[in-house]
Amino acid sequence: MDRRHFLLTSAAAIAGTLTRESLAQNTAAPTAVKIKKAVNLGMIKGAAGASIADRFKMARDAGFEGVELNLPDDNLSVEILQDARAQSGLEIAGIICTPHWSFPLSDPDPAKRERTVRGLQLALRQGGELGCTRVLLVPGVVTERVNYAQCWERAVEGIKRCVETAEQSKCAIAIENVWNKFIMNGAEAARFVDEFKSPWVGWHFDIGNCVINGWPEHWPQLLGKRILNLHIKEFSRKKANDEGMGKGFGVELGEGDVNWPAVMQAVRDTGYTGYGIAEVPGGDAQRLQFLSERMTKLLNG
């Protein structure tokens, strides 16, 4: 081997080694980020006369880091919620848009659709004032009177009217997968979000709601960075088959058919760093403590 060929061969070998080392460094598993825990305000059962601030403190004392709210609500002013947040140190982990089931964006009546457009815009503005970065929205419902294409078209039209408010409020719209006969897999969910071409529209991934149509661990790879929030609940196919579909949710977290290690690994692989919000029966301080401890095992175990 002549000197020139030797040098070229050696240089190529070194370059190959460096490239492999660089790739190994770049593809190394990222440090796992702890997913924070939250609970819906409606799940916190305080003593008679307990204030909103008292209920926030109950969640904090149980180990939760955030509270989910249902807004707009005439009985919950931004000032009351800001005070509760300040006293407890908790964050507002998410907001559920209250009118979206009663007046879905898919409804044939434009006046009803308008109710949810206005409600979503108000919830987004309140979210911005409270430092919350996402509002959950059920986009519509497919029914005998509303076909899939109509639901898609009307939902897109209504949500587009709210994107500017989301951007101004720095509070995103997070579409949730529910039992609405609409968007029943991760591929559809990703395509729906991409309709808006906006960072202010993403997905609220409800883990328990997926089980009836498949396996929740399949969704995160398709949704990727579109995931803005998580709802944490369980589902038992056996209970659903034996007692009725809705009864499938009647099992404790970790005792149904959700493969939590697989689901949470898939979520972590997307780089998700937000909240896991319990959506299960709540209760008193003891019940909240149980849920907090169980969620720690499932989310970060």
Image (cartoon, grey):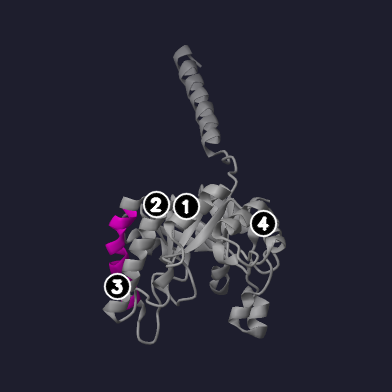
* Magenta stretch in the rendered image: 150-167
Q: Earlier in the sequence, mark 2 or mark 1?
A: 1
Classify 10 Å Cα crowding around label 4: few (below 14), some (14-19), many (20 and above): many
Q: Earlier in the sequence, mark 4 or mark 3?
A: 3
Residue toward you, 29 or 205: 205
Using residue 196 as the reference point, say whether residue 258 is left or right of it.
right
Q: What's the residue at 55%, 53% (across, down)? A: 66
Q: Earlier in the sequence, mark 4 or mark 2?
A: 2
Q: Secondary structure at mark 2?
A: helix
Q: Position of residue 161 (x, y in %)?
A: 27, 63
Mark 2 vs 1: CB contact within 8 A: yes
Residue under label 1, please give it.
Answer: 82
Residue under label 3, please give it.
Answer: 114
Q: Earlier in the sequence, mark 4 or mark 1?
A: 1
| Label 2 – label 1 distance at C-alpha | 9 Å
Using residue 183 as the reference point, say whether residue 164 is left or right of it.
left
Residue under label 2, please give it.
Answer: 129
Q: Nearer the viewer, mark 2 or mark 3?
A: 2
Query: In the figure, residue 154 lies in which quadrant?
Result: bottom left
Q: Position of residue 177 (x, y in %)?
A: 47, 68
| Label 4 – label 3 distance at C-alpha | 38 Å
For the residue marked with disc 2, what is the amino acid?
Glu
Residue toward you, 194 or 299: 299
Please determine whether, in this image, residue 256 is positioned above or below residue 300: below
Residue under label 4, please give it.
Answer: 292
Q: Secondary structure at mark 4?
A: helix
